[in-house]
Image (spheres, rainbow, N blue to C red):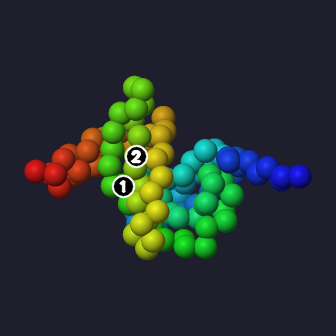
């Protein structure tokens, strides 16, 4: 008999961004700061809080996928990567600045 585990667990939590200090009220799908887009490596599967790493996850890439903007986060401690959709409450001006920074890293 196999025991199945959910790949996603909705977790409504508030947190303070370790980079910019923004207090973020999560909605159960929130996984990054809406102001600076920083994330933290706390999950193995989204929402499970089972990762022991706890490293800061910075944006390694920003791209379009089926018409949705997606952030590619990379853990600065262990290198783990995960894609996360840009959310409606994310700061779009800051997102445009981030995009320009990422383009500047390529050229």
- Residue at position x 45%, y 71% in the image: 78
Extreme residue toward the left, this view: 107
- Residue at position x 67%, y 47% in the image: 8
Q: Is residue 103 above or below residue 17?
A: above
Dot 1: within a 10 Å radius of its alpha carbon, few (fewer than 14), some, or many (20 or more) residues?
many
Depth check: give the residue in front, 15 or 38: 38
Q: Which mark is residue 23?
A: none
**Quadrant of the image occupied by residue 77:** bottom left
* Residue 25 in view (yes/no): yes
Q: Which of marks 1 and 2 precedes in the sequence?
A: 1
Extreme residue toward the top, this view: 67
Query: How many discs appear?
Result: 2
| Percent of width and height locating residue 39 | 47, 59
- Residue at position x 54%, y 71% in the image: 54
Extreme residue toward the front, this view: 1
Q: Which residue is mark 2?
A: 71
- Residue at position x 69%, y 58% in the image: 48
* Residue 22 in view (yes/no): no
| Percent of width and height locating residue 14 | 62, 57
Q: Which mark is residue 59?
A: 1
The reply to whether the C-beta atoms of the residues labelled 2 and 1 are less than 8 Å apart is yes
Is 64 placed left or right of 51 in the picture? Answer: left
* Element carrying mark 1: strand
How far apart, in angstroms, are the residues tagged by discs 2 and 1? 6 Å
Is 97 placed left or right of 62 in the picture? Answer: left
* Element carrying mark 2: strand
| Percent of width and height locating residue 98 | 28, 49
Dot 2: within a 10 Å radius of its alpha carbon, few (fewer than 14), some, or many (20 or more) residues?
many
Is 16 placed left or right of 49 in the picture? Answer: left
| Percent of width and height locating residue 4 | 79, 50
């Amino acid at each position: 008999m196999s025991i199945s585990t959910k790949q996603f667990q909705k977790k409504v939590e508030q947190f303070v961004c370790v980079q910019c200090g923004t207090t973020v009220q999560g909605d159960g799908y929130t996984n990054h700061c809406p102001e600076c887009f920083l994330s933290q490596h706390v999950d193995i599967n989204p929402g499970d809080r089972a990762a022991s790493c706890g490293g800061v996850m910075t944006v390694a890439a920003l791209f379009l996928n089926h018409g949705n903007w997606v952030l590619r986060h990379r853990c600065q401690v262990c290198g783990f990567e995960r894609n996360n959709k840009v959310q409606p409450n994310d700061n779009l001006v800051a997102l445009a600045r981030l995009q320009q920074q990422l383009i500047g890293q390529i050229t």
